[in-house]
Image: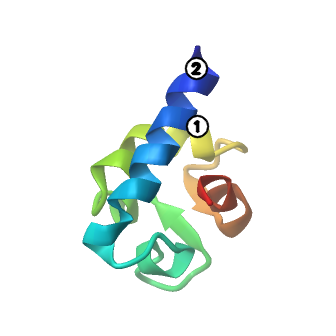
Amino acid sequence: MKTLNTTLAVIVLASSSAAYAAVDFASFDADGDGAITMEEAKVNPQLVKIFDDLDADGNGEISKEEFSKVQ
């Protein structure tokens, strides 16, 4: 069930990308440090909802590799 919820949230995130021009890593990595923090993710409520699922290593940040699951 968790996988289904994550998949649905990823679809919603991708489909809501029109509001943000594109769903790409750089658009969320505001400080350009190569990771998306929860603070940076807050620009998109759908990303906040799936943040913990995408943060596979549990370090509190989403790497470019982890984010690639969205695309």
Distance between mark 2 and mark 1 Cα atoms: 9 Å
Residue 28's quadrant in the figure? bottom left
Q: Which of marks 2 and 1 is nearer the N terminus?
A: 2
- Taking the spot 74% from the left edge, 63% from the top edge, the residue there is 65
**Which residue carries the number 2 mark?**
2
- Identify the residue at horizontal 40%, vertical 46% (top origin): 12
Q: Can residue 38 be seen in this view?
A: no
**x, y percentage for residue 51?**
49, 45
**Mark 2, other Cα within 10 Å: few <14 / some 14–19 / many ≥20:** few
Image: 2 above or below 31: above
Residue in front for this viewpoint, 10 or 25: 10
2 vs 1, front mark: 2
Residue located 67% across and 53% down the image: 69
Residue type, mark 2 in image: Lys
The residue that mark 1 highlights is 53
> x, y percentage for residue 26?
51, 81
Q: Residue furthest top?
A: 1
Q: Which residue is drawn at 41% across and 52% down?
A: 13
State left or right for residue 29 relative to residue 61. left
SS at badge 2: helix
- Say whether marks 2 and 1 touch (CB < 8 Å): yes
State which quarter of the image contains the N terminus: top right
